[in-house]
Amino acid sequence: MSNIADNLNKVQSRIAKALAHASNRQSDVQILAVSKQQHADAIRELAALGMHDFGENYLQDALPKLEQLADLHLCWHFIGHIQTNKTRLVAQHFDWVHSVDRLKIARRLNDQRPDQLAPLNVCVQVNISEEDSKDGVAPNAAEQLVRQIAELPRLKLRGLMAIPRASSDFEQQVQAFTELKSLFDRLNTGGAQLDTLSMGMSYDLEAAIAAGATMLRIGQALFGPRPA
Ligand SMILES: *Cc1c(COP(=O)(O)O)cnc(C)c1O
């Protein structure tokens, strides 16, 4: 078995085990394969194993790969910081954006989404650990942003995304993810109709599942270490 096939098996069994431990969960969890810095060949190999959703965070690195892999009709997610002058290319080439954290970016993506494409799926990125260095809207400003984005016709608001402060402690990881899940539930109680909770990466996917993630963003555990 190739490394990538072996890695995928391992990730799937970690997920199955975590779901079995989370007795309160009803639904399955989706894998978003984070292919940043990975070569197109590795993406092709993972796609051949049934993976359909791939995440990239640097536009310049991503665009040539999207072109090389166009024959596969993959679903591409933009998960990185978005600069104002990059919104048009993101709106033209991606199916999802997980990192919308201000209205200005949302408006530009909405205005620049080509008419012949379906509305762009978006998640609002929340700075759940309230770190100065992190992207993401402050948790107490998320509700307003969600309400404003829901009004934009060329965007389809899907949910929330966060990258909590790194911790090797499982309970701390669960606590941070649970804060995002609570915000998600509150917004839905208020009528937001969100279906996606994008949280959990290679090293903390078990905690994210325990807290109710619906989409895991997994890079190194699938592809191995990122090439330099
Ligand atoms: C790189 C990245 C990931 C994946 O991280 P791994 O540790 O490789 O699983 C997930 N989300 C975002 C936003 C990333 O930039």
Image (cartoon, helix red, strand yellow):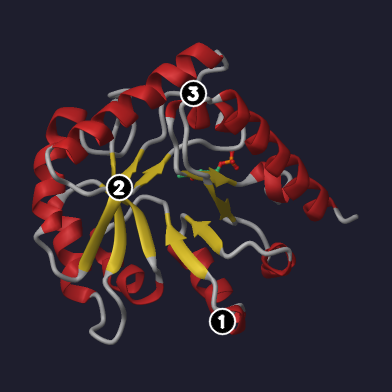
Q: Which mark is residue 159?
A: 2
Sequence-wise first label, 3 or 1:
1
Which of pointers 2 and 1 lies earlier in the amino acid sequence? Answer: 1
Q: Earlier in the sequence, mark 2 or mark 3?
A: 2
Query: Looking at the picture, which amino acid does disc 2 mark?
Result: Gly
Residues at marks 3 and 1 touching, judged by CB atoms closer than 8 Å:
no
How far apart are labels 2 and 3 at the CA level? 22 Å
Q: Residues within 10 Å of mark 3 (few under 14, many from 20)?
A: few
Tell me which residue sits at (23%, 84%) in the image: 115
Above or below 84: residue 184: above
Relative to 222, is 109 on the left or the right?
A: left
User: Foreground: 22 or 220?
Assistant: 22
Is residue 159 rendered to the left or right of residue 187? right
Secondary structure found at label 2? strand
Callouts 2 and 3 close, C-beta under 8 Å:
no
Q: Which mark is residue 70?
A: 1
Residue behind mark 3: 166
Q: Answer few, some or many: residues within 10 Å of disc 2's Cα (few below 14, many 20 plus, some between 14 and 19).
A: many
